[in-house]
Amino acid sequence: MTEITRVDGRTPGEMRPVTIERGWSAQAEGSALISFGNTKVLCTASFTPGVPRWLMGKGTGWVTAEYSMLPRSTNERMQRESVRGKIGGRTHEISRLIGRSLRAIIDTKALGENTVVIDCDVLQADGGTRTASITGAYVALADAVEWARANGHIARNAKPLIDTVAAVSVGIVDGTPVSDLNYIEDSGAETDMNVVVTGAGDFVEVQGTAEGTPFNRAELNSLLDLALVSTSELAALQQGALAG
Amino acid sequence: MTEITRVDGRTPGEMRPVTIERGWSAQAEGSALISFGNTKVLCTASFTPGVPRWLMGKGTGWVTAEYSMLPRSTNERMQRESVRGKIGGRTHEISRLIGRSLRAIIDTKALGENTVVIDCDVLQADGGTRTASITGAYVALADAVEWARANGHIARNAKPLIDTVAAVSVGIVDGTPVSDLNYIEDSGAETDMNVVVTGAGDFVEVQGTAEGTPFNRAELNSLLDLALVSTSELAALQQGALAG
Amino acid sequence: MTEITRVDGRTPGEMRPVTIERGWSAQAEGSALISFGNTKVLCTASFTPGVPRWLMGKGTGWVTAEYSMLPRSTNERMQRESVRGKIGGRTHEISRLIGRSLRAIIDTKALGENTVVIDCDVLQADGGTRTASITGAYVALADAVEWARANGHIARNAKPLIDTVAAVSVGIVDGTPVSDLNYIEDSGAETDMNVVVTGAGDFVEVQGTAEGTPFNRAELNSLLDLALVSTSELAALQQGALAG
Amino acid sequence: MTEITRVDGRTPGEMRPVTIERGWSAQAEGSALISFGNTKVLCTASFTPGVPRWLMGKGTGWVTAEYSMLPRSTNERMQRESVRGKIGGRTHEISRLIGRSLRAIIDTKALGENTVVIDCDVLQADGGTRTASITGAYVALADAVEWARANGHIARNAKPLIDTVAAVSVGIVDGTPVSDLNYIEDSGAETDMNVVVTGAGDFVEVQGTAEGTPFNRAELNSLLDLALVSTSELAALQQGALAG
Amino acid sequence: MTEITRVDGRTPGEMRPVTIERGWSAQAEGSALISFGNTKVLCTASFTPGVPRWLMGKGTGWVTAEYSMLPRSTNERMQRESVRGKIGGRTHEISRLIGRSLRAIIDTKALGENTVVIDCDVLQADGGTRTASITGAYVALADAVEWARANGHIARNAKPLIDTVAAVSVGIVDGTPVSDLNYIEDSGAETDMNVVVTGAGDFVEVQGTAEGTPFNRAELNSLLDLALVSTSELAALQQGALAG
Amino acid sequence: MTEITRVDGRTPGEMRPVTIERGWSAQAEGSALISFGNTKVLCTASFTPGVPRWLMGKGTGWVTAEYSMLPRSTNERMQRESVRGKIGGRTHEISRLIGRSLRAIIDTKALGENTVVIDCDVLQADGGTRTASITGAYVALADAVEWARANGHIARNAKPLIDTVAAVSVGIVDGTPVSDLNYIEDSGAETDMNVVVTGAGDFVEVQGTAEGTPFNRAELNSLLDLALVSTSELAALQQGALAG
């Protein structure tokens, strides 16, 4: 295939510049300000001893997540969900996705009866906010686990993190499979797929949606190929941030 | 692979008995009471001329869906969402999935400025309620479109339905990929995937989630193979019901 | 008075065909799908050991009820109360009426510290949904009590049910008192009265409302006469269903 | 039957002292502060030209009512419904009852396309708040209608009020039918009935509930007898207040 | 400055007639119906042994307040906050102000582990509802404390009330600083200031707001001068009411 | 007075380091990320042509504000208001304060029928979030006005901004009046006062609250002295940021 030029000049498999500002928050036990191009998400991890009532006495911990967008993170201002008095379906969906993605790489037994709440607040949105959230949340979570170890909440040799996790959106734009869609690409994509992958290269979530024409098996395979490459790049960036 | 026996004696690729009672409701423009084994969903399609304000004057119609479970459709009674005063994330997620699945096979131009609201109310739940909902909703939708044609709301030769659509859940249970999980299987599955497929065999949605161990590419492929077989069986049953 | 013919050909005191499908639900401890003509209500009784906090330690049980209509149970689709985020006055009123009616024939001491929640979900509505709900709920409740006895939650010789209970709507349509109004009759009735009666023929509730012209004592008496006849017919049908 | 003495020394058919302070509010188009003994309700009638959207252009007016209790109108402080974020079933029920009672004596054609909202706020509660509300609301409504006539919103010769309306609670206490139950009597009553009666002596609402033992026809008749006497006394007091 | 005549003929520093009807409620432990001209507020104090969970075992009591307006206390009817399903910002603000003002003169240690809830319900509004509320609430609170002493909930020699508290609104109207603005004055004021002052003449709250032109230091000082005079007059009236 | 050392080594009148990062957001018409020490607030100004319905056709614009805190902006994670389903009193109070402060320096006629919505989202909180919000919001507002001028929404020579505005918190800590309290100082302050001042040195808001002992006139005057100095420093920083 000849290389097409994407709206911002990238090649099909090329992600936008990704930066991870680890430890952005002075208050949270773990935090990261992550950017996928113009998409910026502040991820914090709040560690607290104890678990919700329904888990008490079972010897396992709990990791959950909440996602939200600032009202003017988008090009047109959105009404706050607190003002509307209810949380929309999209917000619920993404919060649940982030939570599941992180729980997939957590050994809750090793975490002990402790809770980590991940908050992903989108400060600026340009496509890929859920995948940036998952990728940044992992860094915040890893630091919160280290904090808990340093402060004696989990044992020195406990290993609650059994792998790393990162996510990317891939999609078919003008007939070509591309990685890490920005807002303009996302709006016009025929198919949009969010893929959450462990450091070991296994799938945690595959969520593909035909926005226009349904997609066939070959297209699905091309998208998964791209996703595996991009998430391995993200895993390297996460490692770099945590080593820094 | 030697045939294992599933908890209810089925082979891995075998669906539970599926029945579609078309026209169950005396009031709705289209309706179907669908059963996947003990899972029973009442699907109604309400056709109304006109579209929501944000679509007016664009010459296109609108199809949307709402999913809900009766409080005692489950083994333990659940609190009503009307009593809680808010709709949970899972309900939102499934309502949106059903709506997207149906819109994928609707030509909204051909529908004209008309709205179809699909209601999927789970009367009894035993796993697979969202896939049964999509499959039954298609039948209700098809009848509502016929009703609209018969009553002059859409043109005689308009073809709003460009394909059929059906859905099945597949998953890995005890290491084996199986189709149409019941509640017990679903609770213990390592991976759970909901696949929405058109009559032409293309994908509308692929939503795979690792509940326990992440899954690899080979497992993903086995699950998709099963899903394509089961959804083609469902397409035949839909055709039969609509021909009846 | 010469017999007038009602809109569906019934005589003034004649109820619509009533059917009671006992044990419709595979999950609930007691259940009945009841029809008064085209009105169909699914009644389930959920038995759980224990009582709400405010009753603990008093040695008495609790019976409560929730009523709801499916959005397309009516001729025009109604918005779901879960979507509106609040329960309407009519729903509250009917839920409370059903609960009071059942508590009137329950000996809560004999029930012990156990709770029964009755859910009445209207699948199709054509007038009389609250009276059908009460009548069907009694059957579901009776089966839940039997289940509790069989499962050792209440003593073998305890008699929590001290009577049966059934309900009918009566009203004045075109000047004539009639029984079991369907939707068309109900819409045009001058007076509408819901009467809840025990198997012994005593009143639990009498709720008469002048929709148009106020009614006099003679009219009130005619309506009560009709109600007593119809509820004794319903009591016989309940007995038949429970004997089946 | 020998006359028993009630808890506050009244005879069975005797109401508590009733006072109607007409025109209590300086702001409302009509108002009355009504007392049934220690029960005090502030009733205001707000007249506004125009009707809700669903009535526009039909040439008829609208009368509706809202009932509420101050948090410390009762012996133990209740939580405000505004703080709970939702209106309870009892409040809904009573608001609807007041509205229906007033609409029964209003000729909405003669009212023209105008709206009257009645607010009944219970300042102090000692049983019978709903019946005091209806009785006081009539006075407020009558004054609002006069105000509208004086201010040219309805024609000089229009007669929107076709009768008067008043209400009383009656019940069986210790086996004896009594009128106008106070809180202590109400708490211990076997049967409680609210009866709304026009000036002409016809029934608008009859709502009888067995709190304990179901009631028979003879008891029902005794209660209605008492209610007709008491409501005729109330009608005289209303007339007096409006003449004042 | 020559004396200007205010809209109702008062001099700049003159308050409207203030009346305090102590013990208005037969149910509350303390109560007062206070009027500042046409503004009428019913203040009740509900004393209950015990404190909220977060204060338990700390040996200190709790005083809190809730403010609300009847829907037709104003010239145009307002929607109830219970009907809107949420409490507005203004209501929250005033409830919090009243609570803080009373807590400033309460020794919560001397109150012991007891709670007083103050309810200020505006029956009629003509400006100054929050300052009338604070002034009346003090009287209700003082009586509730006496009630608690008389009923053995606090020790004979405990002195939970360390001072008195009263409040007045002052503002600049047509360039002149005036005290106790009525609704018309308040609507047109350039600056509006609510001042809460103890019996000893110290400030509890100073809340000045420029509605139009910002105000300078000299204007601020004139307003405080007026407020100190008016609140000392109110303190005398409170003393009189409590002595009565 | 000898100089005491504050908890972070500042002199009584010394503010924390203040930084204003103008134009932080790529999407909003105006924006600023402002820091008062560790307090960081993202302020965005969203300009839209048109006004709310109640202002249409009056020839004036509208400026409003919404304040919110990220859940982990604080030392202990707070529940989101969107999750609680309602906005708390403190949030309402601060949103209203910010809005009033900005409207005091806006000529809404010169703004024309346009709306500016200011969002102040606290990313990190260490005391003074409302005063930082007002100070940063002014910069965002000024840029949004410039954007509107550059894009032809307001006339070249229109001057909607008639002054600048900034705010600081002052208070009495351990008996000493100090400026710009951080969280620790704020928690222990006897008196806390938020002062909003125009560039011309006039007051827009003065909100003083005795948290412990009531304050006297001399203390009030000392606090105002400090506030005027600090807000003039802030005005210079705003000017610098806007000149940058």
Image (tube, coloured by chain):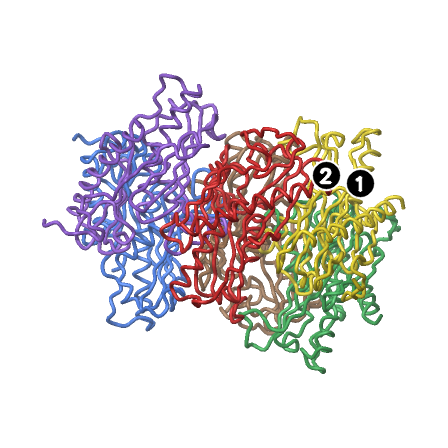
Chain colours: A purple, B blue, C brown, D green, E yellow, F red
> Which numbered circle lies on residue E200?
1
Q: Label 1 near label 2: C-beta < 8 Å?
A: yes
Residue farthest toward the front in the current orientation of the protein: F2
The chain that hosts pointer 2 is F
Residue nearer the viewer, F32 or D85: F32
Residue nearer the viewer, D162 or E145: E145
Residue nearer the viewer, E225 or F44: E225
- Residue D29 in view: yes
> Residue sitting at 40 percent across and 53 percent down?
F28
Circle 2 is placed at which residue position? F214
Quadrant placement of the C terminus of chain D: bottom right
Q: How many marks?
A: 2
Q: Where is residue F11 in the image (x, y as percent from the top left)?
A: 57, 33
Q: Where is residue F86 in the image (x, y as percent from the top left)?
A: 54, 47
Which amino acid, by three-letter code, is at mark 1?
A: Ala
Classify residue B160 as left or right of residue D72: left
> Residue sitting at 70 percent across and 66 percent down?
D45
Q: Is residue A139 above or below residue D20?
A: above
